[in-house]
Amino acid sequence: MSKEPCVDEYLLENQETWEGRCFDTGHDVANAPPFPSTNFVAVDNGNPNPKHIRSSMYRIPRSGRNYKDLNVPLSVTVTPFAVLEHPDENPAQFRPNEGNPPNCGQCGGFMSAHTIFDPSGQNFECRFCGSKTPVPSEYFGYVDENGYRLDRNYRPELCRGTYDLILEDGTDNSTPLYVFLIDISSASKECELLQAVLDNLIKHLESITNTEGHPQPRATVILVDEYLHILDIRNPHRPGLCSITDFDEIFLPYREELISTPEAIICALKRLNHPLESLIHPNPDRPSILGPGLEFALRLFEEFGRVGKVLVFLAKRPTKNVQGVVIERNELGNGSEWTPDKRYLEPLTQYYPLLANKFLDKGVGIDLFSCSRGDIDLATIGQLSVVTGGNIYWYDDFLAEYDGEALYRDISFSLETEQGFNVEMEFRTSKFIRITSIHGAPTSSTSCSNDLENIRKVRFGSLNSTIQFDLDIGAKISALPEKVLIQAATKFVDKYGRTRRRILNLCLGTTTDCEEVVNNLDWSVWTSHYLKLATFRVRQGDWCVAETRKSLMRSLVISLASIRRRFGAHIKQTSLFIPPTMRMCPLVQHAISNNLKLFPTKAPKPDEYAFYFMAIQRFGPEEALKFVIPRVYKLNIYEEVEDYDEAYAASRIFHYLKRPANYFLSEKSMYLIENGCSGYIWIGMNADPDDVRSYLGITEGKLDLRASFKVLSIDTPENRFVHNVIAYLNNGRPRQLSIQITRSQSASTYQAESLLVEDEHTLEVRSYSRFLRELHSNIQMMSM
């Protein structure tokens, strides 16, 4: 097993090569980037930061037939509002004049560092449709012998891979509106959701307050139980609540101060004589609502003509017989009798998808925080976020004492990270390449441009996640040009109310050398492609675990057999030949079909099952890879190190990676197992009780209690190390880890050990070793 390709070696090697170093994105054509989890600084020399856009292939076969023979997916992931750690990575911004810079007159393509002008400088050729467009006189410039402008280094659109056009300045009437829609039912009080949100509400309002000199956003607070309660600050000295009990026709009870600046709401909250939650006493036996609260929020956006975001905090399935009621869904089944069924992923009612489309039309996104101790039917209510471009945050058996910190950080990410409102994305490729599918964008918001297969337009209410475009090259294409340009142009409203357009231009080279193609693959995007393909097929009802395994095996066999025929002739027939850039691909294909979150062996929690299928569609490459191949970190590291000060640095956690299989876990040790969404600390049966106390702050006798699911804080270097590691892993993530603790061979260890994807869980879910043997056998048969 030690000779099998494993992810821990690759991650550590890439980390040591690129950590803290500068990466040249490429001047002529894009360079294959470092791994997405590596902390590097991108230098934009004509191609965009890979944190914004990545391709599965950075050198493309020049003919369609070679592309088909190689059978490597061509996918591009686009994250227009990626989290950038270094200020030098921020895109250049400038205000365009009318026709300056010009667009293609036929397809509307925007300028790039790869635009070619004719010798006179009077026309330029579009890289997407091939047409020539006249250059306006005010944009005229001389060109060199290669067709590039002489002044290109002074124009961001001609020398940068990413640039922003500021189309309109922000005003006090164009800033976004933030609506906090909070469930205050008895279920919310039981799990302490209400208290957790309100305790930090002032901090969140402060985080969306713009700096002095910029127009301020607007916000409002709506509380829902069986009625609507709006924070009323018309009298700033005596703020209170305005309740609405009639939902036959949703109306605005007043207009003045119905929405206010964050600063005004903060002042009102500080003036309250009693906590806001004390003004409401929900009856524990009463039903709850959601639809009327959303319709009221929609009326706000319609009345005030603003874009923005709604943050929905829900602790209970809406059961009151009004708009948006959700009936109880039949149970999924029990034990081994359960089989995947696409009906469990479909909404029970079309009310929420239709309502979400109305928010989308107004340029509003919805982020859903599912904080229930039961199920809220996420497959139905989650459509609010799926359709509008918002994010879904799901907490398993939410209790504020244990999950409050993760909730706080998730809300902070939702509000503070760069994002766009009323987003319109135009995605273009060379006319020889067609767009086959889009992941992360609802079908209703996607349209073609003039029936061209290489241009798509997508709309979102708000966006701060990743969209994936799957591409294809026809087998009849005899010769692609030497360069293929891919462009993502995103028009949006920012937090200052400005209308901007962010242009990403990625230039991929083409080649006749198969080895060059293989040496420039990005297997993180490969992982994202096959993960989203598998979830799409399951949602369609086409694949179960057996079909997934066969299909993923077949695609990999075709690719590796083709590569072996081309430049692996010197390899012995009895050896499994995998090129270095593809050494993780077998584990990826195996781990997808072995993933018990997608293909559980027993009935899952309905909301958890729906959550993963919804969230995966907007995973970036790093999130996709963590989900497919979970990370396993050893915690009690004193056995492996000599310098404790250096060893206990959280950034060195990659040095303690282990393979995700029980075979590599010692019963004497403790491990942190996480897949980017869920985290578990696994304690071996023979772990030293003193280690358990010093690292986790709990004693042996407490492991069976609910308190064992929280990593306590005590004053030991080991305990600080665990907390620093969790904080380090959570940094910049769209979803924060809520860590649970479990012991080996206990009843609660199933969830943690289900992430060990190299294990053989059932006869259908085989081990990684058996998968490699079967892969080798199939390649040999195909090569005969």
Image (cartoon, rainbow, N blue to C red):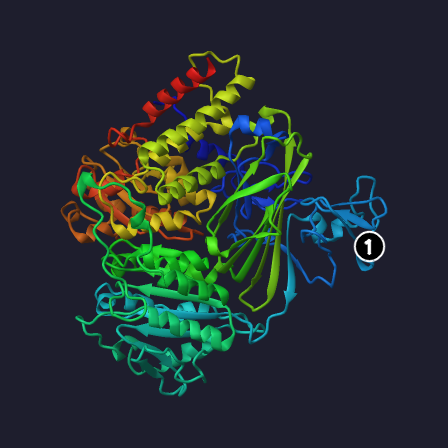
Residue nearest the viewer, comparing 204 with 384:
384
| Residue 184 shows in the view | yes
- Packing grade of label 1 (10 A; few <14, some 14-19, many >=20) is some
| Residue at the spot 29% in from the left edge and 60% down from the top edge | 371
What residue is shown with label 1?
140
Q: Quadrant of residue 760?
A: top left
Q: Name which quarter of the figure residue 327 lies in.
A: bottom left
On the rendered structure, is 466 left or right of 296?
A: right
Image point 36% across, 21% down: which residue? 774
**Which of the pair 213/722 is nearer the observer?**
213
Which of the two residues, 566 or 108, is positioned nearer the viewer here? 108
Q: Is residue 490 left or right of residue 8?
A: right
Q: Position of residue 573 (x, y in %)?
A: 45, 12
Return the residue found at the far front: 451
Judge left or right: residue 672 versus residue 511. left
Q: Amino acid at mark 1?
A: Phe
Q: Secondary structure at mark 1?
A: loop
- The quadrant in which the N terminus is found is top left
Question: x, y percentage for residue 711?
Answer: 26, 51
Q: Position of residue 452 (x, y in %)?
A: 61, 47
Whether residue 6 is visible here, answered yes or no, is: no
